[in-house]
Image (tube, rainbow, N blue to C red):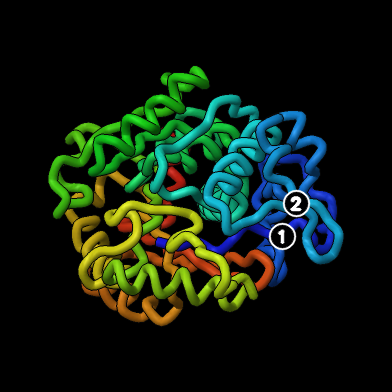
Amino acid sequence: MSRPPQRPATAAPRKPKPNSKSNAATPPQAKGQLHPRNRHQGRYDFPALIKACPALAEFVILNPYGKQSIDFANPAAVRVFNRALLAQLYGIQHWDIPPGYLCPPVPGRADYLHGLADLLATDNDGAIPRGAAVRVLDIGTGANCIYPLLGQADYGWQFLGADIDPQALASAQAIIRANGLQSRIELRQQVSPEQIFDGLLQPDERFTLTLCNPPFHSSAAEAASGSQRKWKNLGKLDPSRKLPALNFGGQSNELWCPGGEATFVQRMVRESRAVAGQVLWFSCLISKAGNLPLVQAALRSVGAVEQHIGEMSQGQKQSRFIAWTFHDRASRSAWLKAH
């Protein structure tokens, strides 16, 4: 699926972020702003990024405001930009993905994790659980392995990344090995594309969280149309220039599925009932607010005890995740204390 460009280099400076190691949950961020613990605050520091990743230098341009930026219409530039962000801010020294695979906007991905950390804190006397005792399942981890990389860096969480694509898993494994993260991130293939949890989880496994960036679109044509619409909205649709169909790449299973996001997430909800005892909180990104009523109805039908909507924003981009659990508050607090 196409992804919106990352926050432009001309964005107004943000308030200084608090210590990223703070163990207290934070109130929701103001509209248009990243989460207060998000490391991507203020304008991008291009000299620091280039120092961390010298290859970025050849992709830096001056935007119409005379500020340093990159050409977000160039997939190679976006890929190297991500590599520089991960190196400068997270200490990830080796990161790459095969051509055509999804290249994620890192700041928004980080916000999802911070929102989940705050959710866990509500069941833990306001303190964010940190360390390997928090085990997270990333459904559709992709070739980029972005959520495990960010989550282990910010919170020390342990991750299992799952995907149906062997090539994506091979790419993710190469990233993990190159950064010496084998003890923090495990990968596993879901061999049945029609299943999400069934056949993936072992009977004795327990997860504090699951997360997922689902295929948003219902067809390849819809994915391509969405990408072109974003270019037009950004003023980058230049008839004299051949732009990539998807500036952030993506394979078919990453971008679309029959029925699109709503159908995928409703299937996830149904399957979650069968593994309710193995997971404290399930969650999934929801790109279209109009899909929320369908998902919430599905949650009521399977008897979810509680559901939570986490709102996120980055400039003009609004997004959200939905989280649900089959455990009451007392059971959730006991789970976190026991693990």
Q: Is residue 88 above or below residue 314?
A: above
In the picture provided, is 253 more to the left or to the right than 41? left
Residue in the foreground of this view, choosing between 39 and 7: 7
Whether residue 121 is visible to the viewer of this picture, yes or no, is no
Write down the quadrant of residue 327 in the picture. bottom left
Identify the residue shown where x is 27% and y is 54%. 253
Q: Measuring from the top left, give residue 305's x and y in whole percent.
A: 33, 64
In the picture provided, is 68 more to the left or to the right than 35? right
In the picture provided, is 315 more to the left or to the right than 135? right
Identify the residue shown where x is 37% and y is 77%. 291
In the picture provided, is 169 more to the left or to the right than 228? left
Q: Is residue 253 above or below residue 219?
A: above
Label 1 neighbourhood size at 10 Å, few (<14), some (14-19), many (20+)? some
Q: Can you tell which mark lies on residue 8? A: 1
Q: Is residue 147 above or below residue 174?
A: below
Label 2 neighbourhood size at 10 Å, few (<14), some (14-19), many (20+)? few
Give the CA separation, mark 1 to mark 2.
12 Å
